Image (tube, grey):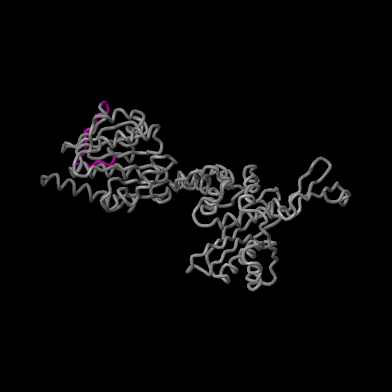
Amino acid sequence: MSLGSFASRLADSLADGGWHAKARPEQLPPPGNWNGWLFLAGRGAGKTRSGAEWVKDLAEANQAGRIALIAPTAADARDIMVEGESGILATASAWCRPEYEPSKRRLTWPNGAQASMFSAEEPERLRGPQFNAAWCDELAAWNNPTATWDQLMFGLRLGARPRWMVTTTPKPSRLLRELLAREGTDVAISRASTFANAANLAGAFLESIRVRYEGTRLGRQELNAELLEDVQGALWSRQMIDDAALKGAALPDMVRVVVAIDPSGTAGASDKGDAVGIVVAGKGVDGKAYVLADRTCKLSPDGWGRRAVEAYREFKADRIIAERNFGGAMVEHVIRTVDNSVSYREVTASRGKIARAEPVAALYEQNRVKHVHSFPELEDELCAMTSDGYVGDGSPDRADATIWALTELMIGHQQIEIGELNCVQVDAGRYAGRINFVTRGFDNPWGAW
């Protein structure tokens, strides 16, 4: 390198502080001998800038003479990866600026390094060329991901250590799952949410998307970069959870509020017992149920008892309910020890988890349950409840507590009008099949059926 070009490079670096000095840690290549770098990030999190800077470093340092740039479409490769505000041309160093030939879909740096643009719509165009490196943008949006990826891998064969980088907002796909499964072997993974890049995003934009999307399934995917998948046979789908999000709507007055406890045998954080599910839910004046809080914890009996009573007081609940089947009178004793004045009722599991869960899942399908906040761990447990059992990790403590709470509010004492009659089902589960008929203005003239 000549003295002049070195001076130009130094001045360039000092002028903007240098990318490596101002980038967030997850935007920089991770350490280690990885073959691939997967950067999962939300919208506007800075993943395009990361990809462009990675390509720039490879080209300027002569670490890669042939680079593939692959986007969902040819227009995306041109408009985002190359010509975009955070693309290769915008981030290029003045002392080593590439020559851009749009008609050839090619960039050529002064030292001879080249980058060629490809579309995932045309995987066969990757048959033949060979590369030292590849930057793949928005892989989750590729129309033909497997064929495109396979052709790229066949051509990624130049040099001692060919490498690839993927920048994408996650969506469920087999290819993305396969790459994630390789973490810790030959794939390094970085993650970032939209809000991690708040310093470089308009405040009005952040506020609007926070109000509209935070806590929704779409928000968790597009903003928090979470890979969300529906489990085959699940009673709850991610769409049902998304539809249950309150999304900024006003919370109605509550006619009832309960705190439900799903107990476990844990003595606290030091043992291997399950957590104690503690969920607060209410029934609004509009007839819908609202999940208000998830206070699940792994504490000693005194600790989780206090947490349940605190939630009871905070939300002005009218009752704490807990399953009797585990521990008998133990839960009531714990609660009474903390506060003897608490209204408490035990519930008995006369049916299995799935049988209890199915009518609650039906309430979600009918749009009769809302979540006032995002409850990721609780929602993940619900989406792992299948007709064949629970397929998630550990025990569904949060889900069980939620099911107990919503059963108490919406099913255990449900009243449904049938013409001039009211059909009242009392203590569903315990008195299954027993129905009382009541006419308006009369007190049970027909008795119990």
Q: Which residue corresponds to the image point at 29% horizontal and 35% vertical from the top-left?
A: 152
> Is residue 182 found inside the magenta-colored segment of the image?
no
Q: Where residue 175 appears, x then y in whole percent?
A: 38, 40
Q: Where residue 336 appears, x then y in whole percent?
A: 66, 71
Q: Would you identify the image quadrant in which residue 2 lies?
A: top left
Q: Residue lying furthest top in this view? A: 103
Q: Quadrant of the N terminus?
A: top left
Q: Is residue 284 above or below residue 156?
A: below
Q: Is residue 72 above or below residue 327?
A: above
> Horizontally, is 328 left or right of 152 in the view?
right
> Horizontally, is 83 left or right of 294 in the view?
left
Q: Nearer the viewer, residue 205 or 150?
A: 150
> Is residue 95 found inside the magenta-colored segment of the image?
yes
Q: Where residue 271 appears, x then y in whole percent?
A: 49, 68
Please count the marks in the image.
0
> Horizontally, is 175 left or right of 133 in the view?
right
Q: Nearer the viewer, residue 93 or 341?
A: 341
Q: Nearer the viewer, residue 172 or 46?
A: 172
Q: Which residue corresponds to the image point at 61% horizontal and 50% vertical from the top-left?
A: 354
Q: Residue lying furthest bottom in this view? A: 337
From which residue to which does the magenta span run?
Answer: 90-103
> Horizontally, is 256 left or right of 37 in the view?
right
Q: Where residue 96 appears, x then y in whole percent?
A: 19, 40
